[in-house]
Amino acid sequence: MLGPMLGEAWHAMGSNRMRTALTMLGMVIGVGSVVLMMAIGQGAQFAVAQTISTMGSNLYIIIAGTTQTGGARSGGGFGFTLRVADGEAIAELDDVKIVAPVHQGTQQLVYGSKNWSASVVGTTASYLDARAWALTSGYVFGDSDVRSATRVALLGKTVVENLFDPGESPVGKTIRVRNTPFTVIGTLAAKGQNLDGRDQDDTIIVPLTTAQRKLFGVPFAGSVRSIMVQASSAEAMPSVEKSVTALLRQRHRLRDDQDDDFYIRNLAAAADSAAETTRVMSMLLGAIASVSLLVGGIGIMNIMLVSVTERTREIGVRMAIGARQRDILTQFLLEAIMISITGCLIGLLLGIGGALLVNAITDMVIVISGGSVLVAFGVAAAVGVFFGFYPARKAAALDPIEALRYQ
Amino acid sequence: MSEAVIRVVGLGKSYVTAAGLFPALKGVDLTIDRGEYVAIMGPSGSGKSTFMNLLGCLDKPTSGDYFLVERNVAQMPGDELAILRNRTIGFVFQGFNLLPRSSLEDNVGLPLVYSHIKREPRRKKAREMLARVGLEGYANSLPARISGGQQQRVAIARALINSPSLILADEPTGNLDSHTSEEIMELFGQLNDEGITVILVTHEADIAAHARRQVRFLDGHIVSDLQTSGRGSNAC
Ligand SMILES: Nc1ncnc2c1ncn2[C@@H]1O[C@H](COP(=O)(O)OP(=O)(O)O)[C@@H](O)[C@H]1O
Ligand SMILES: [Mg+2]
């Protein structure tokens, strides 16, 4: 039964090409935009996930704040409330895996005739573990380098590219940072942009003490601007935050009526919210695209209703020679489904083509998953059935003699 | 009367109109036996088409009973009526009612689509039927490409394809010139000779003269029912 019916539906589609094509257009645009929007949305999610994976997991950054004396806050910017010893105490807490003091700032770098401005991170070797940052050559400085403030540096990829000629090995060379010579002992693996869009590879890493004494200067020995803390697991993060806060308040001898003199920034939470933002954006894109799919479906219903009215007499003839209600229903339903599936196929191709085009002319990441293609296809078929059903039922419910009398 | 193909008892049909119920058929009794050739006559508006549509199971009566091959179809459900229209009855219309965008072969074979016959045997049978009505070689033409008389032949071929026991024709020559009408009537005569019951509506005496029985309608009643010698022998 379905065989001849499919032939009939195909025939009907071909017999009014212009109208069929216009109806399909709704479906084509609907499916095309769903596929394209999902590709862009999933691409954005993928890009954010990629960035998050370069950050290091379960991280807090504790930043020195301002002291409060008699209700008046001392000046803006960084305070000098954190000490390296605070970090050592935090390292003793339960569920704290890694602690790294960090003093970061921007400095001018010179090598030969080239100079370049980059972010300089003064820290300890454990910083690289917390950030899961690997080396591509050389070795990491050790605790003794930090103790004796040796002038050694690890260079990020962007720095290497801007200071050295292609193919030249930086390890063993001497660069000048704020006129102080530093020996390059290693190069860092590429990490790409961070969530704020900053190039993480535009960085050099040096021992904390060297950075403080030779480059930035500190008001008193043992103070530090920030401390990076890695919790042993995502679940442990809230308890680590609590115990760190309690420990620091106690160490800084803050009274209950005094505010914290430090800030704790949850990097994992920032990552989560970035991921959530892109997820919502991607859903929004999909939802907007779905509206056009809906409009396409309504277009099909519209045309099928016109078609049923126009072909009332044909329906009458078919019934007069033995078509049952369900034969007529099947015929019109098949027509609607065929229009929507054909439109869907064309829309899929255009959507994928559009996504590849977007990828080619912008540097946006595009992800076309089999899942999204399947979803678009399923939805299109469902739209065909859903919006085809009402006109088809209307056709099937016609009375043979009334239909035959229709002029 | 086991030979009766059609037996109607007190058959009535009223149409719902703006002015109220309009009785177009007012209690008709008639029995037609297998192999008969009946002409239904009467002035315009006398209820001939109404009666034919009921016989063809295209419409339902508002009163009375209709036994088609001894089965009461007056209140049968729609799907069973569809099967009767498909297998037992061949209906021929005044306006041919071919599907304009389908080939003659597809038009003729269409009833077989609804009796689940596969494409190849369907095409073969349709070509046979076209040959039978004198239209071999036209299988792939569209209806608009052939004359009215040829279109009516195609419609008859379509009516015949499922070997019905009954051919119903409502003014089959109404749209045709007298020469073509004569040819179509000859075709009906042949079919009747082969044992098919033929019932046709006409208001032309020379067309009715082909039949062997003439039933005359007036105002929704049967006013006369005559056996005649038939086959045009008493044409003027
Ligand atoms: N669908 C209808 N609705 C209302 N009245 C109708 C309808 N069909 C036919 N009639 C009326 O019923 C009467 C019989 O019509 P019909 O059976 O077509 O007569 P005939 O075929 O003998 O000319 C006419 O008066 C006609 O106006
Ligand atoms: Mg009539």
Image (tube, helix red, strand yellow):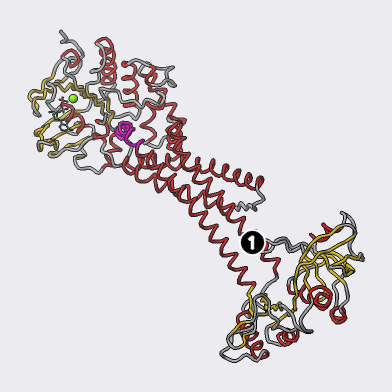
Q: Tell me the subunit letter for badge 1.
A: A
In front of the other: A371 or B67: A371
Above/below status of B141 relative to A128: above
Quadrant in which residue B158 is drawn: top left
User: Which quadrant is home to the N terminus of chain B?
Assistant: top left
Q: Is residue A398 left or right of residue A339?
A: left
Q: Is residue A301 left or right of residue A197?
A: left
Above/below status of B98 relative to A5: above
Q: Position of residue A42 (x, y in %)?
A: 59, 56
Q: Is residue B235 left or right of residue B196?
A: left
Q: Which residue is mark 1?
A: A48
Q: Is residue B130 magenta?
A: no
Q: Residue at x 72, y 80 (%)?
A: A97
Q: Residue at x 33, y 32 (%)?
A: A310
Residue range highlighted in magenta = A306-321
Using the rendered image of the protein, determine whether residue B86 is visible from the camera's viewpoint.
Answer: no
In front of the other: A113 or B136: A113
Q: Is residue A309 magenta?
A: yes
In front of the other: B20 or A290: A290
Quadrant in which residue A300 is drawn: top left
